[in-house]
Image (spheres, rainbow, N blue to C red):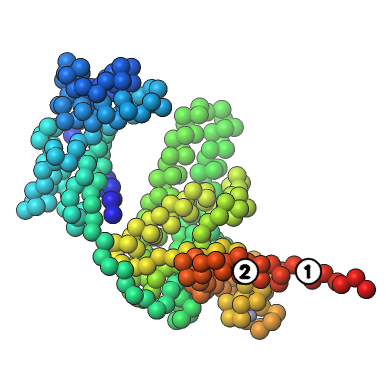
Amino acid sequence: MLLTYKVKHNRDLSVELVKARKIAEYAIEHRSRSSADVRHIGLKSAIANQILRKYSRNMALKSVRSVVLTVPAQSIRLIPETRTIYIACLKLDLDIRYLPQFEKVNQIELDHEFAFVTVTINEPPLQEVEHWIGIDLNSTGHIAVIGNPTTGKIQKFGKEAPHIHRKYSKMRRHLYIEGHSRIAKKKIQRKENRKTKDLNHKISRAIVNEAAQQACGIKMEKLSDIRQTARQSRSSRAPLHSWSFYQLQTMIEYKAKLLGVPVAYVAPQYTSQQCSRCGLLGTRNGKDFMCPHCGHVDHADANASFNIALRPSFEESDGRLHQDRDWCKGRIDTPQEAPS
Ligand SMILES: [Zn+2]
């Protein structure tokens, strides 16, 4: 698996980045791939070649936005004793003590502040699991609720998310009223995105650790386009943007892979209406779930996460999903009276 880590580099690379931009502009204008053509700009050829290749190949690129310094694998030296990386063509040392064990470094990209170190990591074999925990995303008031139907254990994550989104929506609205620039609003958006990403990192870490500890796999709903539209809202009451749930799922997936925890996806239909005890459809009223068939009463989020954990994944049920969905539909529609 390829993973990219962000490492602060503490070096002023502004001169090199200006040169990199010039080379990128040259590459777009002349579609040249020869480093001899840009030698006069004075950037080391190992990096210049990468930029030329990237910008001359892609015909869709008409103008240069943000250029990074791309260092290929052969220009990167790993010093295992000190856990540092040395980039000779920039005379730059990088501290990689906080990176997990990896096979090799594939490439490093550098901007003004950070080095983005892409490494190959060997995945451990997937664990054999008997039980699964289910993750209900975007539940009432939390980003994620995880439930283990075998033990009955429920955990909730990301209570602060709705507040974050409300706070920044409010800030944006005020700026709008006061007639501030688009740039100011963009800045706030970026700040909110950073906060959300941070939070998603923490939540995904906690969920994956919990699954590993309980020796369970992780089941999540496949977020369909329909659900995305239904739950997406421009209102500030929406706890999070739908992209952030995809982000969280992606983070859970790769963190699980690193620990050998299996991840599976299930169909999202009726996970909150179905009764996790008898499987029939019950009623959800805010935070409460009630099943009129078996009398089961539960917190709505707990019930939904149990349903997700108990539901066959797409892999397990290949082809049977449509049947299941139709079966559910039959239960939710009012039965049609036969004409007398
Ligand atoms: Zn029931």
Residue depicted at x 30% and y 30%: 54
Q: Amino acid at mark 2?
A: Gln
Picture layout, residue 142 above or below residue 132:
above
**Picture coordinates of residue 159, whole percent (x, y):** 48, 60
Name the residue carrying label 1: 334
Q: Out of 132 and 60, give the one closest to the viewer.
A: 60
Disc 2 to disc 1, C-alpha distance: 19 Å
Name the residue carrying label 2: 323
**In the rendered image, is residue 236 in sight?**
yes
Q: Is residue 151 left or right of residue 172?
A: left
Mark 2 or mark 1: which comes first in sequence? Answer: 2
Query: What is the secondary structure assignment of the residue under circle 2?
Result: helix
Disc sitting over residue 217 in the figure: none
Residue ranking furthest to the front = 319
**Picture coordinates of residue 173, whole percent (x, y):** 57, 38
Quadrant where the C terminus sits is: bottom right
**Picture coordinates of residue 230, whole percent (x, y):** 62, 53
Residue ranking furthest to the left = 81
Picture layout, residue 147 above or below residue 204:
below
Residue ranking furthest to the bottom = 294
Query: What is the secondary structure assignment of the residue under circle 1?
Result: loop
Neighbor class of circle 1 (other Cα within 10 Å; few <14, some 14-19, many 20+) is: few
Tell me where residue 280 sits by quadrant. Answer: bottom right
Q: Amino acid at mark 1?
A: Thr
Residue depicted at x 49% and y 48%: 243
Q: Out of 259 and 188, give the one closest to the viewer.
A: 259
Q: Can you tell me which quadrant of the image ligand 1 is in?
A: bottom right
**Picture coordinates of residue 176, whole percent (x, y):** 57, 32
Neighbor class of circle 2 (other Cα within 10 Å; few <14, some 14-19, many 20+) is: few
Q: Is residue 2 left or right of residue 204?
A: left
Residue depicted at x 42% and y 41%: 191
Q: Out of 48 and 59, give the one closest to the viewer.
A: 59
